[in-house]
Image (tube, rainbow, N blue to C red):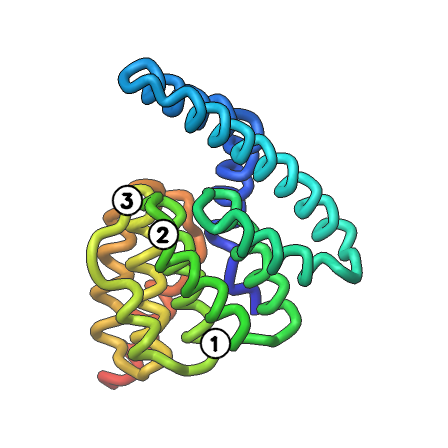
Amino acid sequence: MDVYSSEEQQVEAIKRFWKEYGITIVAGTILGLGGLYGFRYYQGHQLAQAEQASTGFERLLQAQEQQSADWVQDAERYIESNSKTAYATFAAMLKARDAVLAGDFSLAEQQLGWVIANTKDPVIDAIARLRLARVHLQQQQYSQALALLQGNMPVSFKLQQQELKGDIHLAQGNAEAAKQAYMLAKASEGAQANQLLKIKLDELAHVQTEGML
């Protein structure tokens, strides 16, 4: 089961963004701080750390794409050394993805849980919650999956959030709750292009109609 299909393009876009602009953003923030308070040493130190994290993540990404034998251990060391950076959350999500593909759901839960606990980015938080909810769904841990989907997410994730809620309710055998969640997903931005959601609603309506006969 591909528990990651819905957010993969968003993750790739975020990774490309940070790869291209991450250092510039960090530099701009730190330079502004330096201009206000004159923290020259702090400025240079933080910029050097950001550059090192960026370079290290690029090497890690290449190792993961090539499925290097040591890439998982390298990722662990990288996350530990760069835990305060956005790159560490990307590394943890890479580890989680490979863990899911290997059927190691416990490791995937650990990595995605770390991302949720450490990221300050609402987009990364939403992606990690959706992914972890799918991991729980795969293991029939429905309560844990639904708990991750409570509360607000960025508007661009509302469709995925509600559709996944519907999938979980349906797996629980709660067709009415599934229908309500799917209808909320249908009302979300971008739903017109989601043919799978339409199929789910059509099939659910068919099943409910048969149940009334």
Residue closer to the observer: 99 or 196: 99
| Side of 128 relative to 163 (left or right) | right
Which residue was labeled with disc 1?
Answer: 138
Q: Which residue is mark 3?
A: 154
Instruction: Give the label, 2 or 1, closer to the camera.
Output: 2
Q: Residue at x 47, y 76 (%)?
A: 138
User: As displayed, is residue 36 above or below residue 138?
Assistant: above
The structure residue drawn at horizontal position 54% and vertical position 39%, both measured from the top left corner, is 15
Q: How far across and how far down the image is residue 98, in percent? A: 63, 63
Image coordinates of residue 109 in percent, x first then y, are 47, 70
Amino acid type at mark 2: Asp
The answer to which of 97 and 21 lies nearer the viewer is: 21
Q: Which residue is mark 2?
A: 125
The amino acid at mark 1 is Gln
Q: Can residue 78 be seen?
A: yes
Q: What whole-number distance in Å separates the C-alpha atoms at marks 2 and 3?
A: 10 Å
In the shown orientation, is residue 160 left or right of residue 92?
A: left
Where is residue 143? Give x, y as percent.
29, 79
Look at the picture and state if 161 lies above or below 42. below
